[in-house]
Amino acid sequence: MTLKDKFTYRLLHVASRRMRRLSNTARSRFANKLGAFAFNRIPIRKELAYNNIKTAFPDKSETWINNVLISTYRLFFTNFLEFLSLPKSYNSIHFHVKNKHILDKAAEQKKGVIIVTGHFGLWEILGSWLGVNGYPIWGIIQRQGNQGADLFFKEMRESYGMNHIYRKSSLNNMYELFKENNMLIIASDQDAKGRGVFVQFFGQQSSTPKGTAIFHMRTGAPMVFSVAHKENNGTVVISFSSIELNGSMSIETITQAYTKMLEAKVREYPDHYFWFHRKWKTKSKA
């Protein structure tokens, strides 16, 4: 590692130790302050996020959109600070889990499980719950350009039981995970450029990764949709839902089915979505 990489690794460890010393309430207050600061002082992709919310909710007022946006900033920092405080803070989190039996029933098929999620809510807390509760969970992770950050994130996730495999790793390795009845969690909602399949998301054509649908079609592994959101009282609600496929099964119909489920969650909790993605950047040529 370079000197910069080593410095980043140590800095993240210092931040992690600090976060572990704070109470849930103190971390929440700090996240809110960081969110407000970023909203007012760090305009990176702020206009993009604003326009994405406006595209999704065209009938909402400017005030409503700005309120959602600042809450989005706060939740982003909440997710990150909670991640930094793991695994020590895990036992202080109050969880409410909905439909756990759907996940367990899927695992009983012995074909592996595809857990479909998005960049929504407390996705790092969702991963920690799965790992701590003994599920053989693997995440597809984007390799960080900074080796120190990459190592830190890897070690943190492994500390609470989540294994990981890098994007662009051998597909054979991923298929082996299903053969061994592992669970692969995939956040399948970023713009996939020309490689994706176009499905509807908030009435707009959105290029979405094909991988989830291809894994399901080739392995027969059941798909379960899952997200984690935070209630006003601090409770983290984790929900599991079956992905219902009606009619013919294709990459498009599968992708549309879970994308529709993600949209429904975003409509319910609009500030929980990571609006900073260039979600509708790629345009359909059809």
Image (spheres, rainbow, N blue to C red):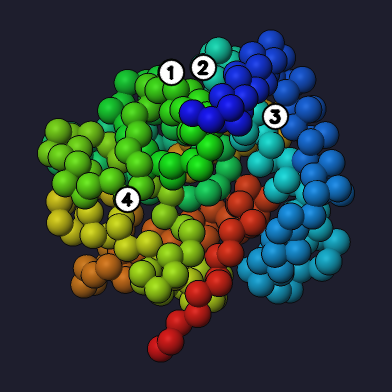
Packing grade of label 3 (10 A; few <14, some 14-19, many >=20) is few
Packing grade of label 1 (10 A; few <14, some 14-19, many >=20) is some
Name the residue tied to disc 2.
87
Name the residue tied to disc 1.
159
Could you tell me residue 104's position as x and y percent? 27, 33
Tag 2 secondary structure: loop
Amino acid on which the number 2 mark rests in the picture: Pro
Tag 3 secondary structure: loop
**If the image is split into quadrants, where does the C terminus sit?**
bottom left
Q: Identify which residue is drawn at 83% across, 66% down.
A: 62
Q: Sequence order check: which comes first, mark 1 or mark 4? A: 1
Amino acid on which the number 3 mark rests in the picture: Asn
Which circle, 2 or 4, is nearer the viewer? 4
Q: Identify which residue is drawn at 73% across, 41% down.
A: 74
Could you tell me residue 163's position as x and y percent? 34, 29
Determine the CA span between mark 2 and mark 1: 7 Å
